Structures are given as C-alpha cells and as structure tokens.
Image (cartoon, rainbow, N blue to C red):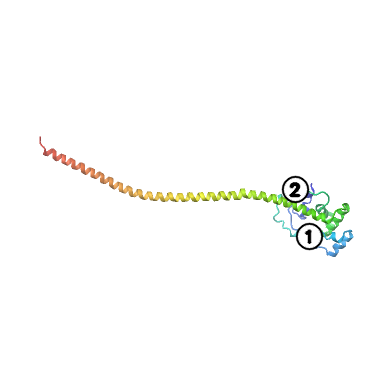
C-alpha cells in the first residue's frame, strides 16, 4: 500500500465503518506553555515547535480539521486523488511522513494533543534526517496542493466538456425542437382555419349548386314539355 493510500485515514482521522470521514469530537488543546515545554524537552526550538505559526507567510492557511466539511466528499474522487499523490510522493521525509508519524496509534494514545504530536514527530524525523527543516515540510504541502490544483484544472476541463456535450448541446437541441414545434403548431392552426373556411364555403356551394341543378332540370323539363305539347298540337292541326 502506498504512503498516500495508507495515510487516507490519517487525513481524516475518524471514519465510519465504510471509511467515510466523520466529525471528530472536539479536543481541548494544551496551553501554549505546555507545548513549548514539551518542545524543549525534545530538543526542538520554539520556532520549529510552532509548526504553523508563520505558515501564512508562505501562502499556507492551516485550519483545524474540525472546520473541514466532509459531508459532500466523493469517495471515488478522494481515492483517485490519493492514488495520484501516491505516485508523486516527494522523495525523503516531508509533510506526509510527518503526518503519518504524528498519527501513529501508540502516539495518539499517549499524546492526545495534535500539535505536541507534530513537534515530537518532527524531532524524530529530524534526528534521522538532520537536513529536514520546517520550510521543507511547508513547501511539500504547497507542492501537494499544486498537484491537486492541477488535477482540479484537468477535472474542470472534463466537466466543462461534459457540460457542453450533455447540457448545452441538449438544451440547444431542445430549443430547436421547441422552435420546430411552434412552427408546426402555427402551420396546424393555419390548416385548421383553412379547413374551417373551406367547410363553410362547401356548405354554401353545395346549397347553391343543388338549387341551380334543380332549376336547370326544371327548365329543361319545362322546355321539353312545351315542345311535346307543340308537337301534339301540330300533329293534330296539320293535314296532308
């Protein structure tokens, strides 16, 4: 198991049975004097003991884990980020080794205060690697943050592409379909109006045509009748 994969539960010290981060119970921090005394006992300078005292000058803002909102964390994304960082783990001791050492189970039980555990673990790492410095620790955090930000950039590009293909393109297709529907509905209304007008005209034409046909036949019958009557009269009047 890679260092980052093994440190997942250290980044989120309390997890449920499914490995999801949960909010830890608030722990009371030891007084500053106690921290300084502990650091002195370990042979650490007061400057190194204040692990995050001047981190802001390097662009790092340290916040208590209790302030981190884990309610919307995607476990799959988290695992991918951890795997990526595991592949890019910087050589030599840095923040990760310090974090892992500070969250050793034995140390957790004997030293509840996280800041004191950091100072003790830092002293242990520095004893093994004298060149290790607070600046290197903080710089490694900045480097890992940059790795994650690079992944955020790539992920955002993928989301934007997905948004364009699955949302914008579909919305455009929907608008086009709605426009075509509106055109068809207008054409349908026009055809309905035309049909209604034609039906009214057909009724009138049928009535007029029936009347004229009746009058035409009556006229023809009248003329034929007249001719037959004249034929009968002529047949009787003319003698040969």
Real-space Cα distance between discs 1 and 2?
28 Å
216 to the left or right of 190: left
Residue 31's spot in the image, x, y percent? 83, 64
Residue 181's spot in the image, x, y percent? 50, 49
Residue labelled with disc 1 = 57
Mark nearer the N terminus (1 vs 2):
1
Mark 1 or 2: the one toward you: 1
Residue at horizontal 73%, vertical 50%?
81
Query: How many numbered circles does the render carry?
Result: 2
Residue at horizontal 85%, vertical 63%?
34
Residue 235's spot in the image, x, y percent? 13, 38
Q: Farthest residue toward the front?
A: 57
Q: Farthest residue toward the left?
A: 240
Q: Are marks 1 and 2 in contact (CB under 8 Å)?
A: no
- Could you classify mark 2 by the number of other residues whose Cα lies within 10 Å: few (under 14), some (14-19), or many (20 or more)? some
46 to the left or right of 206: right
Residue at horizontal 46%, vertical 51%?
186
224 to the left or right of 117: left
Residue 103 in view of the camera: no
Which corner quadrant holds the C terminus? top left
Q: Choose between 149 and 64: the one closer to the eye.
A: 149
- Could you classify mark 1 by the number of other residues whose Cα lies within 10 Å: few (under 14), some (14-19), or many (20 or more)? few
Residue 210 in view of the camera: yes
Circle 1 — which element? Answer: helix
Place residue 49 in its image quadrant: bottom right
Residue labelled with disc 2 = 84
Residue 178's spot in the image, x, y percent? 52, 50
Circle 2 — which element? Answer: helix
Residue at horizontal 43%, vertical 50%?
190
């Amino acid at each position: 198991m890679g260092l980052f994969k093994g440190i997942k539960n250290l980044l989120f010290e309390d997890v449920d049975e499914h490995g999801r981060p949960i909010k830890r119970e608030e722990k009371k921090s030891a007084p500053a004097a106690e921290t300084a005394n502990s650091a002195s006992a370990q042979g650490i300078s007061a400057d190194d003991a204040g692990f995050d005292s001047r981190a802001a000058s390097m662009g790092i803002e340290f916040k208590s884990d209790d302030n981190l909102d884990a309610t919307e964390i995607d476990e799959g994304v988290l695992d991918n980020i951890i795997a990526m960082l595991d592949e890019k783990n910087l050589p030599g001791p840095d923040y990760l080794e310090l974090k892992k050492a500070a969250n050793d189970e034995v140390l957790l039980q004997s030293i509840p205060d996280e800041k004191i555990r950091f100072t003790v673990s830092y002293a242990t790492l520095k004893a093994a690697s004298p060149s290790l410095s607070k600046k290197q620790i903080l710089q490694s955090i900045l480097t890992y943050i940059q790795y994650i930000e690079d992944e955020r950039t790539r992920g955002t590009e993928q989301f934007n592409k997905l948004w364009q293909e699955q949302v914008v393109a579909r919305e455009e297709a929907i608008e086009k379909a709605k426009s075509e529907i509106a055109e068809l509905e207008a054409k349908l209304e026009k055809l309905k109006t035309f049909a209604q007008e034609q039906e009214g005209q057909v009724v009138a034409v049928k009535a007029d045509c029936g009347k004229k046909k009746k009058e035409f036949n009556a006229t023809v019958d009248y003329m034929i009748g007249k001719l037959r009557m004249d034929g009968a009269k002529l047949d009787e009047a003319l003698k040969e």
